[in-house]
Image (cartoon, rainbow, N blue to C red):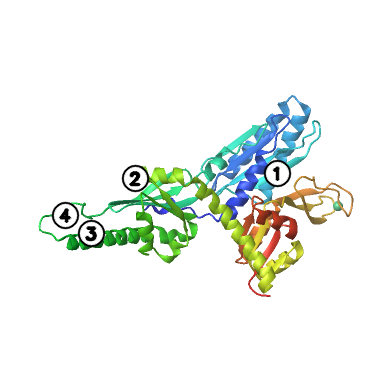
């Protein structure tokens, strides 16, 4: 198996990434004023700065005064950000989106969003349009969910890994189980025993290969599907040769007519509902685990303040965040008197930039998605993060009753 096949992506990171893409794709500019900038790791700093400066001077030719003003402010914001982070681009690169997202013509509300790609960004891109260009990021999602598929009958087995919409065959096996015709002179009993023995050995051989291929990636596998005609799948499972870590991952059994590569294709087609349900089930389990902790052990916290305090104290084992939390954290600094403050406000609101101290307009030094900030904190504390959608009743209840932020504790 190719080693780079399984990407190291945390499910919560993926959920955050998806959430950001949904938000970004909802914005429309009034003119060609939304800027998308993709910077790969190791990109030449001066080349990018030169390009941005050039774009800024060229933008003075834009006819519409509002669009011109918005493009120029957006470029300024991007340049400031890059200076602020001192061009420290993450290993996977950085995507920056900036522009006027105000829905009212003539009004301007310039926002800047950053996204760290879930896979390595290869090419640099600058794009100015009436919407953000999310294509390079969208292409990364297609190939992230990972499943194992085993198509098996008595004579043949094919093992594959499904990654997004593509699959890779990682093993093909043929058994030497004899056909139904026994050789002359063999007793029926002995023939049957030999057949069973060969079948047993075949299942064992396939299981060993599956264990070897899947166990090293156990934590990244979203699930395993066992396919094939008749009852062979059940027999294969009853033999119990699969590693216990893989058994926990079995999503279900599906009937297919074939057990070669065509059987793998059939299995993918027939297990779409199983695959879709898998992530929903994981979410339900997480919320239920939290509820059980609230009721039974008391090893839980909820609400913003309580949860963040516990997180900072290193007490949280799993941090649960509802994807309904739509907040942005702004770090502001006054260029006039040096006053600094941090604002946490709803994503739909524009920050109030007036300096508390002297009344001048403060500058935005940093803006971060609130969920991303909390996830960063959690990572430092060795805390797992789970992002909970509101697609299930449990998720909805989690948002409405617990405010969408909670933690399962290691200790009190
Ligand atoms: Zn001030």
Residue 119 visible to an observer of this rendering: no
x and y percent of residue 16 in the render? 62, 51
Q: CA distance from mark 3 to mark 4?
A: 10 Å
How far, Cα to Cα, is label 3 from label 1? 67 Å
| Mark 2 Cα shell of 10 Å, populated few (<14), some (14-19), many (≥20) | many
How far apart are the alpha carbons under marks 2 and 3? 21 Å
Question: Badge 3: how crowded within 10 Å, few (<14), some, or many (20+)?
Answer: some
282 shown above or below 66: below
Q: Residue furthest front?
A: 188
**Tag shown at residue 112:** 1
Name the residue carrying label 3.
195
**Outermost residue to the bottom:** 412
Res 76 quadrant in image: top right
Q: Secondary structure at mark 2?
A: loop
Left or right placement of residue 328 versus residue 384 in this view: right
Residue 155: percent from the left, percent from the top? 27, 52
Distance Cα–Cα, label 4 vs label 2:
25 Å
Residue named by callout 4: 182
Q: Nearer the viewer, residue 328 or 246?
A: 246
Q: Which quadrant is the C terminus positioned in? A: bottom right
Q: Residue at (71%, 33%) from the top-left corner?
A: 29
From the viewer's side, name the closer residue of 227 and 110.
227
């Amino acid at each position: 198996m190719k080693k780079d096949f399984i990407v190291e992506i945390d499910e919560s990171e993926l959920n955050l990434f998806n959430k950001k893409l949904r938000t970004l794709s909802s914005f429309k500019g009034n003119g060609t004023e939304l800027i998308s900038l993709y910077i790969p790791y190791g990109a030449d700093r001066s080349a990018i700065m030169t390009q941005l400066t050039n774009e800024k001077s060229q933008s003075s030719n834009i006819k519409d005064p509002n669009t011109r003003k918005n493009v120029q402010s957006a470029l300024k914001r991007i340049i400031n950000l890059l200076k602020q982070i001192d061009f420290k681009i993450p290993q996977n690169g950085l995507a920056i989106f900036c522009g006027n997202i105000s829905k009212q013509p003539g009004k301007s509300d310039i926002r800047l969003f950053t996204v760290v790609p879930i896979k390595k960004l290869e090419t640099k891109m600058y794009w100015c349009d009436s919407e953000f260009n999310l294509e390079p990021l969208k292409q990364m999602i297609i190939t992230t969910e990972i499943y194992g598929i085993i198509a098996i009958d008595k004579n043949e087995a094919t093992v594959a890994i499904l990654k997004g919409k593509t699959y890779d065959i990682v093993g093909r096996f043929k058994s030497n189980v004899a056909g139904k015709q026994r050789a002359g002179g063999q007793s029926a009993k002995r023939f049957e025993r030999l057949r069973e023995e060969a079948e047993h050995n075949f299942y064992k051989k396939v299981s060993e290969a599956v264990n070897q291929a899947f166990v090293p990636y156990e934590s990244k596998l979203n699930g395993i599907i066992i396919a094939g005609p008749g009852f062979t799948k059940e027999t294969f499972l009853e033999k119990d040769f699969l590693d216990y870590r893989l058994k926990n991952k079995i999503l279900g059994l599906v009937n297919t007519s074939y057990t070669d590569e065509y059987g793998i294709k059939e299995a993918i087609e027939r297990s779409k509902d199983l695959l879709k349900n898998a992530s929903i089930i994981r979410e339900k389990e997480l919320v239920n685990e939290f509820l059980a902790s609230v009721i039974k052990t008391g090893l839980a916290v909820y609400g913003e303040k309580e949860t963040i305090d516990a997180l900072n104290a290193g007490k949280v084992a799993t941090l649960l965040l509802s994807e309904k939390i739509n907040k942005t954290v702004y770090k502001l600094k006054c260029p006039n008197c040096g006053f600094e403050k941090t604002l946490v406000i709803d994503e739909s609101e524009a920050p109030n930039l007036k300096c508390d101290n002297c009344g001048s307009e403060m500058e935005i030094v940093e803006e971060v998605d609130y969920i991303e900030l909390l996830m960063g904190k959690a990572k430092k504390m060795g805390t797992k993060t789970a992002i909970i959608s509101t697609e299930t009743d449990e998720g909805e209840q989690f948002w409405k009753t617990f405010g969408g932020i909670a933690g399962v504790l290691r200790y009190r």
